[in-house]
Structures are given as structure tokens and as C-alpha cells.
């Protein structure tokens, strides 16, 4: 069977891949340390700048601006914008409710009602992440003992938070900006490579011993999906990086989820397979489709990294592979009476999932190319 013939080759490729990854680890770690140092420097710069500006404005409690800057300044521009929005909305709601409830009633009842109202209002407005910040603002306005009207304390609090947010946004945008969309692009390319390795490990277990790293690859692919979904939400808060960037990134993330679901279904289909003789009759068409799917994962990953999708893979045609496999299935259908029902059902399930994965791979490239407005070559 061609899948078996390629098993040794796959193990050799995996060994080469592991050696390459070992060489790349120092570079990756160095880059991560560099990003950590840049983020630390940007945070310190934003905090110090807020404190200096607050002194210039005559705010005695200007440290709240520094605190706000430290809290909202995240690892990339998109997440900083998201955290800034949550903080400013929570502060505004807390300032209004804190001042309003301080006008009537006595402590602690008016304070309790104010916090209760803040959580309810934020929940009704779909701002659950802002409810804690609203409660903090209410606490400062109503419980901190200071002379002067409460409305001045509320305005000062809002002004300090706005200062911290403005400074944090300026620093994250102008000083070594780290764009969530660029991290997402690299993350999606890596996601397709990981899913390609997951696919290879699944097929190793088809009519053979399951790959030892199959559970780890499953978890790696799932972790990549979750991380990229988070980056996608952050990237939507950033200015567009060109025609169709948001649409293309969102489409690739959606195809990634669909491919992972198809891979999990394929993993379930090949479970407990032991030398199914019926599947041998589907060679070499079944093996050719599997090999081209492996290449397809790598090709799409390369297209994502280059952000150019109108380049079709050479020396492979997934639709032609599917047509040849379907013809082979028709040709051997009459021989099914000589095999167990489990073997036949497993073979049909495998070829069905392979066709689905192949079509999803092709569609991920073609549909993304259309979404970003490329002219087809």
C-alpha cells in the first residue's frame, strides 16, 4: 500500500523536521525575549510619561493615569485598543453612577446600590469586562475620603484614566508597534503546518500502529486554533492593513476550524483499524490523494506567510485526485462481499473525510484569494 510505502519516508521527514526545529529554537527564544524586553520598555515609558504629564496638569493623584496605562498596554495594538475601550467605558459608567448615588442615601447602602447598578448596567450593555472597572471607580469616588465636591473627584478620575489610555495607545502605536494581524498571519501559517503534521500522524495509524505523538499533535492543533481565534478578535480592533485583510484572516480562521473538525472525524474513522484488506484495493489512488493533501497543507501555509493566494500548487490537483479515487471506489465496489462490514465502512469513511479535507484545503486558498481581491493567474 502506498501509505505504508510512504511511512518510512514520513518518519525520515519528521526526523529532519525535528532537527530543523531544534536549530530554530534559539532563534525563536531570542525573538520572544526581544519582544518581552520591548513590551517592558514600552510599559515603563507609558507609565513614566503619564506620571510626568499628570504633574504638569496639576493632578495630585496622577498615578491613576500611570496605573491605567500599565493595565491597558498589551502585547499588541489590537489587544491594547480592546483593553482601552473596556477601561474607558467602565470608568465613565462608574463615574456617573458613583456621583449620582452619592447625592442620596448614606453609606454603605448607597454604595452597595451603586455597585449593584454598575454590574447590571454593564451586563445589559454587553460590557461585562467593564463591570469590574466601573465598580473600582465607584469605590474610589464614594469611599475615598477627600475634601471637595464629589463631581470634581469623578471628573479627575475620568481625566486620569483618559490620560493613561491616550498615552498607552500612542506608545503602542508609535513605538515598535506589534500588530495583531501580523501575528495572526504567522499563527495561521503555523496552524496549517501543525494540522498537516496532525493529518500525517492520523494516517500513520491507518492500518498500522498509531503515531506516538498523535495526542500531542491533537492538543497542539487545538491550542493553535484557540490562540488564533483570540488574535482574530484583537486584529479586528486594528486599522486595516490593506484590501481584504480582515476578510481574508477571518476566512482562513474559519477554514482552519472546519479542517480541524474534519481531521478529528478522520481520526475517529481510522481508530481500531488493523490491516484492512479492502482499503488496499483503493491504491494507488488513495495514497496519492493522501500525499497531495500533506503537500496541500504546506502549500496553504506558504501562501499565508507570503499573503499571496492566487498561486496554484504545481504537480498536484486535488480535484483530479478525488475524481480518480471515486472512480476506483466504483470499480472495487462489487468486491465488498468478500470483506467484513467494518472494513468496508472504514474505507468509505476514510475516503469521504479525505475528500472533504482536500476540498477544504483548496477552498481555503481560492476563497481567500477572492476575499482579498487578487486577480487569478
Image (cartoon, rainbow, N blue to C red):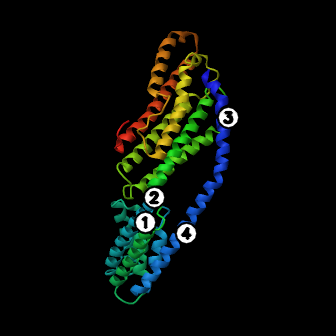
Label 3 crowd (10 A; few <14 / some 14-19 / many >=20): few
Residue 377: which quarter of the image? Answer: top left
Kindly report the distance in space between the C-alpha atoms of the residues bearing marks 4 and 2. 17 Å
- Residue 179: give its label: 2
Residue drawn at x 56%, y 24% as measured from the top left: 287
Q: In the picture provided, is 345 more to the left or to the right than 240?
A: right
Q: Which residue is mark 1?
A: 173
Of the pair 153 and 219, the residue shown nearer to us = 219
Q: Is residue 82 left or right of residue 295?
A: left
Q: Residue furthest bottom?
A: 147
Q: Is residue 76 visible?
A: yes
Q: Quadrant of the N terminus?
A: top right
The secondary structure type at the circle numbered 3 is helix
C-alpha span from label 1 to label 3? 45 Å
What's the CA distance linking mark 4 and mark 3? 42 Å
**Are circles 3 and 2 on residues that touch, CB within 8 Å?**
no
Instruction: Please say if the residues under marks 1 and 4 sit with CB atoms less than 8 Å apart.
Output: no
Front tag of 1 and 4: 1
Residue at the location (66% across, 40% down)?
A: 16
Which label was assigned to residue 185? none
Q: Earlier in the sequence, mark 4 or mark 3?
A: 3
- Reading the image, the residue beneath label 3 is 12
Question: Sequence order check: which comes first, mark 3 or mark 2?
Answer: 3
- Contact, CB < 8 Å: mark 4 with mark 2? no
Can you give x and y, in whole percent of width and height, for residue 116 in the image?
38, 68
Mark 4 against mark 3, which lies toward the viewer? 3
In terms of secondary structure, where does tag 1 sit? helix
In three-dimensional space, the C-alpha distance between marks 3 and 2, rounded to whole angstroms, equals 37 Å
Residue identified by numbered label 4:
40
**Up-down relation of residue 4 to residue 24 (above or below):** above
Residue drawn at (45%, 78%), measured in percent from left and top? 50
Amino acid at each position: 500500500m502506498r501509505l505504508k510505502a510512504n511511512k518510512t519516508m514520513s518518519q525520515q521527514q519528521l526526523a529532519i523536521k525535528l532537527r530543523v526545529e531544534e536549530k530554530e529554537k534559539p532563534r525563536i527564544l531570542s525573538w520572544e525575549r526581544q519582544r518581552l524586553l520591548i513590551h517592558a520598555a514600552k510599559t515603563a515609558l507609558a507609565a513614566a510619561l503619564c506620571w510626568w504629564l499628570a504633574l504638569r496638569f496639576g493632578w495630585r493623584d496622577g498615578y491613576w493615569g500611570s496605573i491605567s496605562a500599565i493595565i491597558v498596554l498589551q502585547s499588541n495594538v489590537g489587544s491594547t485598543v480592546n483593553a482601552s475601550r473596556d477601561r474607558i467605558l467602565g470608568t465613565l459608567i462608574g463615574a456617573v453612577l458613583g456621583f449620582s448615588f452619592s447625592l442620596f442615601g448614606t453609606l454603605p447602602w448607597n454604595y452597595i446600590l451603586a455597585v449593584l447598578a454598575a454590574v447590571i448596567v454593564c451586563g445589559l450593555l454587553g460590557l461585562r469586562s467593564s463591570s469590574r472597572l466601573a465598580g473600582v471607580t465607584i469605590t474610589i469616588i464614594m469611599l475615598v475620603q477627600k475634601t471637595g465636591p464629589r463631581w470634581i473627584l469623578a471628573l479627575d478620575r475620568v481625566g486620569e484614566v483618559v490620560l493613561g489610555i491616550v498615552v498607552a495607545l500612542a506608545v503602542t502605536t508609535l513605538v515598535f508597534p506589534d500588530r495583531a494581524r501580523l501575528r495572526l498571519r504567522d499563527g495561521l501559517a503555523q496552524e496549517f503546518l501543525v494540522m498537516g503534521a496532525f493529518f500525517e500522524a492520523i494516517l500513520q495509524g491507518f492500518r498500522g500502529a498509531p503515531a506516538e505523538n498523535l495526542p500531542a499533535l491533537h492538543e497542539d492543533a487545538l491550542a493553535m486554533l484557540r490562540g488564533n481565534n483570540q488574535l482574530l478578535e484583537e486584529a479586528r480592533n486594528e486599522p486595516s492593513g490593506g484590501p481584504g485583510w480582515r476578510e481574508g484572516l477571518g476566512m482562513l480562521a474559519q477554514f482552519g476550524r472546519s479542517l480541524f473538525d474534519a481531521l478529528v472525524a478522520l481520526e475517529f474513522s481510522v481508530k481500531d483499524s488493523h490491516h484492512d484488506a479492502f482499503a488496499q484495493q483503493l491504491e494507488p489512488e488513495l495514497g496519492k490523494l493522501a500525499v497531495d493533501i500533506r503537500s496541500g497543507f504546506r502549500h496553504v501555509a506558504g501562501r499565508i506567510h507570503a499573503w499571496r493566494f492566487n498561486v496554484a500548487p504545481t504537480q498536484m490537483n486535488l480535484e483530479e485526485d478525488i475524481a480518480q479515487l471515486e472512480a476506483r471506489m466504483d470499480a472495487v465496489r462489487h468486491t465488498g462481499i468478500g470483506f467484513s462490514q467494518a472494513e468496508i465502512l472504514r474505507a468509505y469513511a476514510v475516503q469521504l473525510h479525505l475528500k472533504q479535507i482536500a476540498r477544504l484545503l483548496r477552498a481555503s486558498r481560492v476563497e481567500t484569494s477572492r476575499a482579498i481581491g487578487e486577480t487569478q493567474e
